[in-house]
Amino acid sequence: MNMLDQTIDYIKEKYAVIGERTFKEFPHYLTFRHKQDNKWFALIMNVPMNKLGLEGTQEV
């Protein structure tokens, strides 16, 4: 199991919520919302390495 799957499983177990595909133009992005107030508490998305201060443009 990779780190992404582990993270999704952790959120599902800890907070009893499932990620939503909120952005049609970015189908791989997942948002996670609190059940009580529907506010986001997590977003899983691809980011180019150079946007994180790392070398390269590969998405992580």
Image: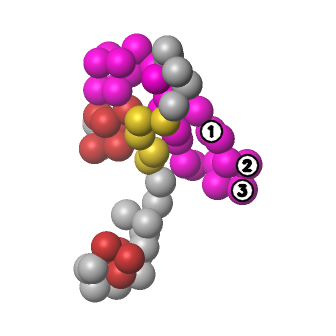
- The residue drawn where x is 31% and y is 36% is 7
| Structure colour scheme | secondary structure
- The residue drawn where x is 62% and y is 39% is 21
Q: Which mark is residue 25?
A: 3
Sort mark 1 into few (<14), some (14-19) or many (20+) by Cα contacts within 10 Å.
Answer: some
- The residue drawn where x is 29% and y is 34% is 6
What residue is disc 2 on? 24
Helix, strand or loop status at disc 2: loop
C-beta proximity under 8 Å, tags 3 and 2: yes
- Mark 3 residue type: Glu
Helix, strand or loop status at disc 3: loop
Image quarter hosting the N terminus: top left
In the rendered view, would you say 58 is above or below 39? Answer: below
Q: Position of residue 4 (x, y in %)?
A: 35, 43
Q: Position of residue 55 (x, y in %)?
A: 28, 85
- Mark 2 residue type: Lys
